[in-house]
Amino acid sequence: MLIAILIGAGLGFMFGKLPGLIIGALLGYWVARRLVRRVVVSKLAQLQGQFLDSTFAVMGCVCKADGDVSGDELRVLEALYQRLRLSEDQRERAKAAFERGQADDFDLDAELATVRRVTGGQRALLQMFLQVQLSAIAADGQLHPAEHDMLLRVARGLGCSEAEIEQIEAMLRGGGAAGAAAESGPSLEKAYQVLGVSSDASDAEVKKAYRRLMSENHPDKLAAKGMPESMREVAKERTSEIGNAYERIRKARAAA
């Protein structure tokens, strides 16, 4: 950007002395900003597209872990297309990625390395990635040992811990995507798992965990870090479940 400003200022000075220098510098700054913005937007779009491709490729690999992709898993896949409001082109790309993940020569470790790169290691994005994977393989109502082992492999490849997987499982079983419609909300035990704190944590520690998770999972922040726009609703649901878990704990402690 500095180079563009200097060039603009130099050209302006040649044609208009001091007034030209000022005008040229301003024009150079304006042009540079537009160019930088285009590059940033283009790079972000590429990162978001890669994140979506890797999501479905790894999903294909994980769903096949128990030997076959079930009809329930395929129905969840179709529902996910609708939930993410994918265009026809995006659906075809997602289907191709899912099939790529089922291939015998699919390099899972390389794909996970790509996910780490495009997310910059952001914990909230990685956990959302895992949550979508878990949603797919739990479609038949149970998590098969082979699928669970594969999910742990994925988590390790992303640099996540088993505790983080348990936190996502809690969101799905107690207050996450699978149980969002339940009026009773998450159980107290699951609420603590959602926030990633123990039941003997202080009120201050619970509130700190809640605020941190809400900040990390804010849809605008995640979008700026590479989350596809189509996953904004998933991010909103995640913040909603974090809020529900916090309210469950707060009310339980107030009544104690």
Image (cartoon, grey):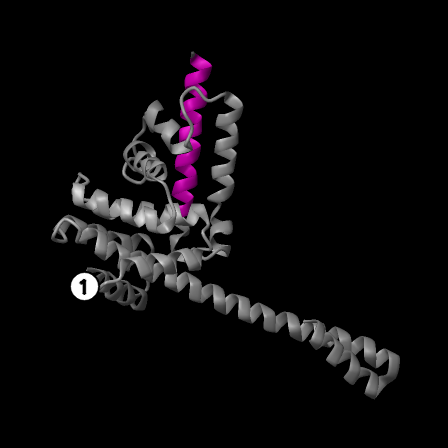
Q: Residue at x 65, y 73 (%)?
A: 32
Q: Secondary structure at mark 1?
A: loop
Task: In the displayed orientation, state which residue is furthest to the right.
Answer: 18
Residue at 32%, 60% (x, y): give it. 111
| Dot 1 amino acid type | Ala
Res. 56 in view:
yes
Q: Is 56 in front, or is 81?
A: 56
In the image, taking residue 47 as reference, residue 9 lies left or right, namely: right
Q: On the picture, is 189 further left or further right than 48?
A: left
Tell me what residue is drawn at x 82 percent, y 75 percent: 22
Q: Around disc 1, counting alpha carbons within 10 Å, would you say few (fewer than 14), some (14 to 19), or many (20 or more)?
A: few
Q: Position of residue 252 (x, y in %)?
A: 41, 18
Q: Which residues are magenta?
A: 234-255
Quarter of image, res 19: bottom right
Q: Quadrant where the C terminus lies?
A: top left
Compared with 58, 12 (above or below) is below
Q: Whole-percent x and y of residue 68?
A: 12, 53
Quarter of the N terminus within the rendering: bottom right
| Rendered location of residue 3, percent (x, y) | 70, 76
Q: Which image quadrant for residue 185?
A: top left
Residue topped by disc 1: 103
